[in-house]
Amino acid sequence: MAAGKPKKKNPRLASGRKRVRQDLKLNAANTSLRSKYRTAVKNVEKAVLAGDKDKATSAFALMQSVVDSVADKGIFHKNKASRDKSRLSSKVKTLVQASA
């Protein structure tokens, strides 16, 4: 026999089956939001590294709204969201000040 993962058993109770269906939907939604968060942060970092201040400021504004909405839903902790915004804000500010 193959030494793979053991086969998962299906729940017998209707409430358990419903819980499995709900968990699949919630997991997909959370994964999507987590990806959206990380992509928004990466876009700001890329713009800062490229030295494009217009793109960095617009990406930062978009990133703030994405980060806040994801943190409000509890996907990431509010302190992590605040920390990420603070760090990226200082990077964008130094980029704007350096180019001015």
Image (tube, rainbow, N blue to C red):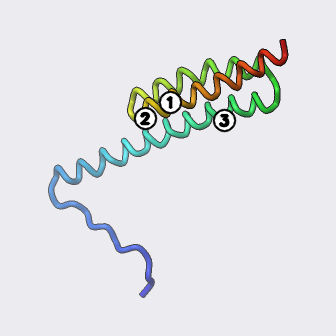
Which residue is farthest bottom? 1
Mark 1–mark 3 Cα distance, whole angstroms, equals 14 Å
Apparent side of residue 32 relative to residue 14 in the rendered image (left or right): right
- Location of residue 59 (image quadrant): top right
Residue under pointer 1: 81
Quadrant containing the N terminus is bottom left
Residue type (three-letter) at the residue carrying disc 1: Ala
Q: Which residue is depicted at the point 31% across and 67% down?
A: 8
Q: Does label 3 or label 2 sit earlier along the sequence?
A: 3
Q: Are marks 1 and 2 in contact (CB under 8 Å)?
A: yes
Apparent side of residue 9 relative to residue 30 in the rendered image (left or right): left
Total labels: the figure holds 3
Residue under pointer 3: 42
Q: Residues within 10 Å of mark 1 (few under 14, many from 20)?
A: some
Q: Residues within 10 Å of mark 2 (few under 14, many from 20)?
A: few
Residue type (three-letter) at the residue carrying disc 2: His
Which residue is farthest left? 13
Apparent side of residue 23 relative to residue 90 in the rendered image (left or right): left
Q: Does label 1 or label 3 sit earlier along the sequence?
A: 3
Q: Is residue 81 above or below residue 26?
A: above
Mark 3–mark 2 Cα distance, whole angstroms, equals 18 Å
User: What is the x, y in percent for residue 66?
Assistant: 53, 25
In the foreground, 84 or 34: 84
User: What is the x, y in percent for residue 16?
Assistant: 20, 53
Q: Is residue 10 above or below residue 64?
A: below
Apparent side of residue 51 relative to residue 41 in the rendered image (left or right): right
Where disc 3 sits, the SS reads: helix
Residue under pointer 2: 77
- Location of residue 56 (image quadrant): top right
